[in-house]
Image: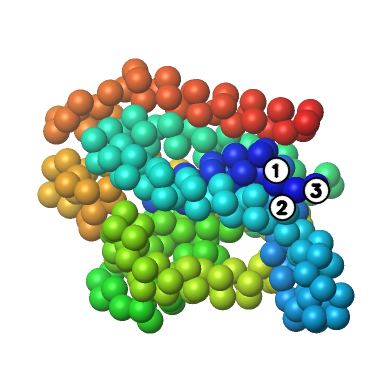
């Protein structure tokens, strides 16, 4: 890469927008836009060897060794998106939860198709796909915990959530929600709480640099099994992002994925609120077409 890349920046913005939403993964966006392998290898290259290159050969050699242009373009896009869209997406989840969830449902469904098609020929690894589905459904059955937002818990939450964010199908925001840290992190972004943001971002950086090495190794040695598992996780995560949900008492949710939520069919949801079935269906179809179109453009670019 030569200098700043607008295309990578835009992909970063899409990843950032996805990571704000519980149930949607930025790793999914990276995968369908064709930058996933480059992202993993670039992050993996941020190691002791790169640090030695910095002192031995200078900043330029270091920057090239870590694919710095790519990483900075992507990171700027993610940050710009999170900062600018945190309020907008939070508003959308609060005011238009059903249509927005339907859109994400379509995006994830199409992403599962794309990841499945990436599995190397010669075996579709059905067992690993089923394992991925079961794993994602089990995660979806967990309910939010209660943790105090301290610098330590924010650090540990960031380290755990980033591992999910980099995986297609696992939502880092949903992991934060399960830990009871989603609202504190979103509020920290909205209000620019420096200490909280520093703790969380530092945890993300540490978790990412450790986890990406395992992920790179799995992609190299067990790519078919990993992609089959990720396909299953994407399919299983559809239960998390399903648009029509009620709370434990059968009433409309007061907040996104509040404790005790459960999925219902649209006509069951209609007893409590407007299911918006037509617009939700159209948005889900749009989501599928949009992702498949992105994949086609990415292949031809």
**In front: 122, or 224?**
224
The answer to whether residue 207 is left or right of residue 248 is right
- x and y percentages locating residue 117 in the rendered image: 72, 39
What is the CA distance from the residue labelled 3 to the residue labelled 2? 7 Å
- Residue at the image position 64 percent from the left and 30 percent from the top: 294
| Residue 36 versus residue 206 in the image, above or below | above
Tell me if residue 120 can be seen: yes
Which element is circle 1 on?
Answer: loop
Which element is circle 2 on?
Answer: helix
Numbered label attached to residue 286: none
**In front: 59, or 133?**
59
Q: Quadrant of the C terminus?
A: top right
Report crowding for label 2: few under 14, some 14 to 19, many 20 or more residues within 10 A (C-alpha): many
The answer to whether residue 32 is left or right of residue 64 is left
| Residue 268 versus residue 27 in the image, above or below | above
Report crowding for label 3: few under 14, some 14 to 19, many 20 or more residues within 10 A (C-alpha): few
Q: Earlier in the sequence, mark 3 or mark 2?
A: 3
Disc 2: which residue: 70
Disc 1: which residue: 5
- Residue at the image position 28 percent from the left and 33 percent from the top: 96
Q: Earlier in the sequence, mark 1 or mark 2?
A: 1
Residues marked 1 and 2 touching at CB (< 8 Å): yes
- Residue at the image position 41 percent from the left and 56 percent from the top: 173
Report crowding for label 1: few under 14, some 14 to 19, many 20 or more residues within 10 A (C-alpha): some
Tell me if residue 112 can be seen: no
Disc 3: which residue: 1
- x and y percentages locating residue 229 in the rendered image: 63, 55
Residues marked 1 and 3 touching at CB (< 8 Å): yes
| Residue 55 versus residue 249 in the image, above or below | below
What is the CA distance from the residue labelled 1 to the residue labelled 2? 7 Å
Which element is circle 3 on?
Answer: loop
């Amino acid at each position: 890469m030569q200098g700043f890349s607008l295309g990578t920046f835009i992909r970063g913005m899409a990843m950032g927008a996805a990571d704000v939403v519980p149930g949607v993964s930025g790793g999914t966006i990276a995968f369908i836009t064709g930058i996933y392998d480059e992202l993993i290898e670039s992050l993996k290259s941020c190691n002791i060897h790169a640090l030695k290159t910095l002192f031995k050969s200078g900043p330029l050699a270091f920057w090239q060794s870590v694919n710095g242009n790519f990483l900075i373009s992507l990171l700027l896009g993610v940050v710009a998106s999170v900062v600018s869209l945190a309020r907008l997406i939070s508003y959308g989840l609060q005011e238009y939860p059903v249509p927005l969830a339907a859109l994400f449902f379509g995006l994830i469904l199409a992403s599962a198709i794309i990841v499945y098609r990436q599995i190397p020929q010669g075996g579709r690894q059905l067992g690993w796909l089923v394992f991925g589905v079961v794993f994602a459904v089990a995660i979806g059955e967990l309910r939010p915990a209660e943790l105090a937002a301290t610098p330590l818990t924010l650090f540990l939450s960031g380290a755990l959530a980033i591992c999910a964010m980099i995986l297609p199908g696992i939502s880092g925001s949903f992991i934060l929600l399960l830990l009871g840290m989603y609202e504190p992190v979103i509020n920290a972004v909205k209000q620019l709480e420096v200490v909280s943001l520093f703790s969380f971002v530092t945890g993300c950086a540490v978790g990412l640099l450790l986890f990406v090495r395992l992920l790179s190794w799995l992609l190299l040695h067990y790519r078919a099994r990993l992609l089959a598992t990720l396909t299953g996780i994407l399919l299983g995560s559809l239960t998390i992002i399903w648009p029509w949900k009620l709370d434990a008492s059968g009433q409309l949710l007061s907040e996104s994925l509040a404790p005790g939520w459960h999925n219902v069919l649209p006509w069951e949801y209609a007893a409590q609120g407007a299911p918006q079935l037509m617009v939700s269906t159209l948005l889900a179809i749009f989501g599928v077409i949009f992702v498949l179109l992105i994949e086609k453009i990415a292949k031809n670019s």
